[in-house]
Image: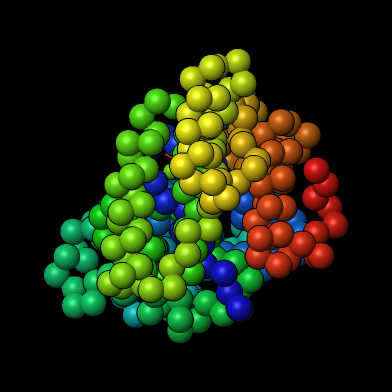
Amino acid sequence: MTKIIAFANQKGGVGKTTTTINIATALAAVHKKVLLIDMDPQGNATTGLGLYGRDRKKGTYDLLLSNITLDQLTIQTKIPGLDLVIASPDLAGAEVELVSVLGREFQLQYALKKSGSKYDYILMDCPPSLGFLTLNALVAASDVIIPLQCEFYALEGLAQLINTIKRIQSRLNPSLNLFGIALTMYDKRNALCDQVAEDVKQHFKDYVFETMIPRNVKISEAPSHGTPVLIYDVMSSGSLAYMRLTKEILKKNGGWQNVSVVNS
Ligand code: ADP
Ligand code: MG
């Protein structure tokens, strides 16, 4: 069965896009069939994979607001096994256009039900808001992963996000599962970082992935090369952490046995 994971946090700059493209890459590396859907009009996942939305006309917008099927919208990335639906420029208008659409929360769910089943994983990189784009992702998803930056204000926004997830579970998508919270940009020299990580773990216990993604300069360099850090510098601390995180995801999802190239 296809695992459909939304990477969501209404805060910007917390590592959603970085986490989505690197987990997608690591899953493809262990021979999973993966689709990444760029739900953010900023299109950072699209450019981060070396593709440019402005050069192409069709993408996530069409998945949400036209009758074009998923098969017609997916493009192959340079990473074998990883397909992408790009954020084309018109995605910026989707938030407003969806307002007047009947069943607006279910557009993506409907599109994926029709033809998403050939993938093992569909990952959705959400924008930094809780508008209709994120709502569509959370309604279509089987699971949600929350990337959380180790910083002082992290917990404040988290409560609001958890409430939104609960509301979606009770009204729109009862099977939505909080898969886990991934702590990002962890800096062991920063005492506040440790404190935040401790607080989150105390509060959310097993929901917090053991692997914390360190702050790593290679991660921040990779997007300008149009490639995930896992390809840009596979031995960097960032890459190794994303491999460990992916291993945890596979283990939690019963895919442990198939992992051969990911070692901790
Ligand atoms: P979001 O999608 O939540 O807005 P991004 O993944 O785009 O966040 O990350 C925001 C910025 O921080 C980007 O420039 C990215 O390259 C950088 N970044 C993300 N994770 C790390 C990390 N672990 N170490 C260093 N820089 C990071
Ligand atoms: Mg982003």
State the residue in front, 156 or 134: 156
Residue 46 position (above or below residue 59): above
Outermost residue toward the right in this view: 260
For residue 108, what is the image quadrant? bottom left
Question: Please, which colouring scheme is shown?
Answer: rainbow
User: Residue at (16%, 65%) from the top-left corner?
Assistant: 99
User: Residue at (38%, 79%) from the top-left corner?
Assistant: 110
Taking 123 as reference, is 263 left or right? right
Q: Position of residue 83 (x, y in %)?
A: 59, 63
Quadrant hosting ligand 2: top left
- Please say whether residue 40 is visible from this viewpoint: no
Q: Position of residue 173 (x, y in %)?
A: 36, 72
The quarter of the picture where the C terminus appears is: top right
Taking 159 as reference, is 217 left or right? right
Q: Position of residue 101 (x, y in %)?
A: 19, 73
Residue 193 position (above or below residue 47): above
Q: Position of residue 87 (x, y in %)?
A: 41, 55
Taking 41 as reference, is 151 left or right? right
Outermost residue toward the front in this view: 202
Residue 181 position (above or below residue 188): below
User: Residue at (61%, 78%) from the top-left corner?
Assistant: 1
- Please say whether residue 146 is visible from this viewpoint: yes
User: Residue at (73%, 31%) from the top-left corner?
Assistant: 236
Outermost residue toward the left in this view: 100
State the residue in front, 179 or 236: 179
